[in-house]
Image (tube, grey):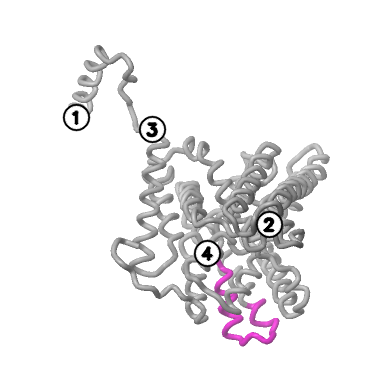
Amino acid sequence: MLEFLSDLPRALWERLRDSLYFLPPFPEQIDSLALFGLLLLLGMLIGEWLQARTGWPKVIGYVLAGTLFGPSLLGWISIETLAKVRPLADAALGLLMLEVGRRLDLGWLLRNPELLRSTSSDIVLSCLLIFVFAFYGVGLSPAWSAATAAITMASAPAVVLLTVEQSRSQGQVTERIILHTAISCAASFVAFTLVLGIVHAEHSRNWINAVIHPLWVGVGSLLVASLAAHLALTIARLLPKGSLAQVFVLVASALLAVGIARMLAVPVFLTLFVMGVVLAVRDERQSLRYTALPEGHWLLAIILFVVIGAALPWSSFTWVTGLQALGLLAVRAVAKMAALALTGGSLPLKKRLLVGLGIQPLSATTVFMAYELARLYPGIGLSALTLPLFAAAIMELSGPALCWLALRRSGECHDDRPVRGGIA
C-alpha cells in the first residue's frame, strides 16, 4: 500500500516532466534543511506550550524537540544536517556568550570580598570534587578527569541568561546568579585551555602540541575578540547611542568574530565571551553600554538548543553511564551548595542556597567544549567524555527548571502576566 502511494505521485511527476522540462527529478526524500525548519517550528511550539501551561522555561521544550527528532531517537535530522547548521548554532551561542561577557562586572566583584570569596569557593570546590569523582569514582585517566572537571564546573550561561530574561527577574539573588555564572564560566574557559595541553601530553607523541595548542586557543581568542571589540566600539562611537545602527554594528562585529574564530579553529564560545568582557572593560564612553541585542536572539536560542538536543548521544546511553552522570551531578550540586552556604556574607543563608540552586544548569557550553576536546583524539575522546555529555543531557531538561525555581522562590520573578490567546 505504501509503495503504491509513493509510486503514483512519482509516475504523475515523471509524466509532467515530459512536458515541463524545468522540473527536477522526483525527490526521493524530504530536503534536510526543510526537515530542520520543521524541527525548529516544532521546537518553538513545544517551548511556547510548555511555558504557557506550566510556566517552565521555553528552553526545555527546544531541547525536547531536538532530542526527540534528532539522530538518536526518531532520526528526522541526520548527523550531516547537524554539521550543516553548526555555523548557525555557533553564531547563536556566540551572541549569547557575548551578552554574558558584557554582564561580567569585575569591578563589583573586586569591591566585594564576600562575592570574591563565594565565587572562588564555588570554582575551587566544584573543580576539585568533580575531578576526584571522575578519577576515583569512574576510573577516568588524570587528563580526562581534568577535562571532565573543566567543562562541567561552571553553570550554563545561555540557560541562565534566557531564564532570567523570560522570568523578568531582578534583585540580589538574580544578580548573584548571573555573576557566579559569568565568573565560573570564565574560570571554566581558562581550565579548558589548560586541559588541552594536558590531553595532548597524555596522548600525543609530539610534546609541542601540549604547549602550542593552549597558546593558540588562548592568545587567538584574545586577539580575535580584541580586534572585533575595537572595531565595534570605533564605529559605534560615530553613531547615536541606543540606535538600531549600533545594534547592527554589535551583531555584525560579533558575527565577524565568529567567522574568523571558525577559520582559525579557535573556540567560538571562548572568543565571543572574551569579546563581551573586552567591550565591558574598554567602553569608557559607554557607547555600547546600553545597546542590547534585539529580541531576535530568542530565535537564535531556539536554533541553539534544538541543535544541542539533537547532538546529545542518547543512542549510547546505558544504565551505568546514566548512574555515573547522576553521581557527577550530585557531587557538583553538593560542591556549589556547600560553597555558597559556608562562605557566609550579608545575604541570608536561604538566599545563598537559592543562588546555589540557580547556578546548577549545565548545557550548551559543556557540550561544545566536550566535542572540541573529543575532536582532538576521536578514537578516545568521545568515549572518555561520555560522562560529562550525559550529565549535560540530564541537565538540559532539569537545569532550566532548577534555575527558574530559584528565581521564583527568591520573590524576584515577575513573569506572572496573563496570557491572551494562543499557546503563548
Do residues under tags 4 and 3 come within 8 Å of each other at their CB atoms?
no
Name the quadrant of the C terminus: bottom left
Look at the magenta stretch and give its main secondary structure. Answer: helix
Disc 2 residue type (three-letter): Gly
Q: Distance between the residues labelled 3 and 1?
A: 19 Å
Q: Position of residue 299 (x, y in %)?
A: 47, 52
Disc 4 residue type (three-letter): Leu
Please report the residue visible at 38 percent of the width from the left and 65 percent of the height from the top: 51
Q: Within 10 angstroms of label 4, few (less than 14), some, or many (20 or more) residues?
A: some
Q: Which of marks 4 and 2 is nearer the N terminus?
A: 2
Task: Between label 1 and label 4, give the one nearer the viewer.
Answer: 1
Q: Position of residue 31 (x, y in %)?
A: 38, 32
Q: Within 10 angstroms of label 1, few (less than 14), some, or many (20 or more) residues?
A: few
Task: Between label 1 and label 2, give the one nearer the viewer.
Answer: 2
Please report the residue visible at 20 percent of the width from the left and 21 percent of the height from the top: 12
**Residue interval drawn in magenta:** 338-361
Q: Earlier in the sequence, mark 3 or mark 1?
A: 1
Q: Depth check: 197 or 383 in front?
A: 197
User: Is label 4 in a helix, a strand or a loop?
Assistant: helix
Q: Distance between the residues labelled 4 and 3?
A: 38 Å
Task: Between label 2 and label 3, give the one nearer the viewer.
Answer: 2
What residue sits right under mark 2 in the picture?
A: 276
Please report the residue visible at 38 percent of the width from the left and 39 percent of the height from the top: 35
Side (left or right) of 93 relative to 150: left
What residue sits right under mark 4 in the picture?
A: 326
User: Is label 1 in a helix, a strand or a loop?
Assistant: helix
Disc 1 residue type (three-letter): Leu
What residue sits right under mark 3 in the picture?
A: 31
| In the rendered image, the vertical position of residue 36 relative to residue 298, given as above or below | above
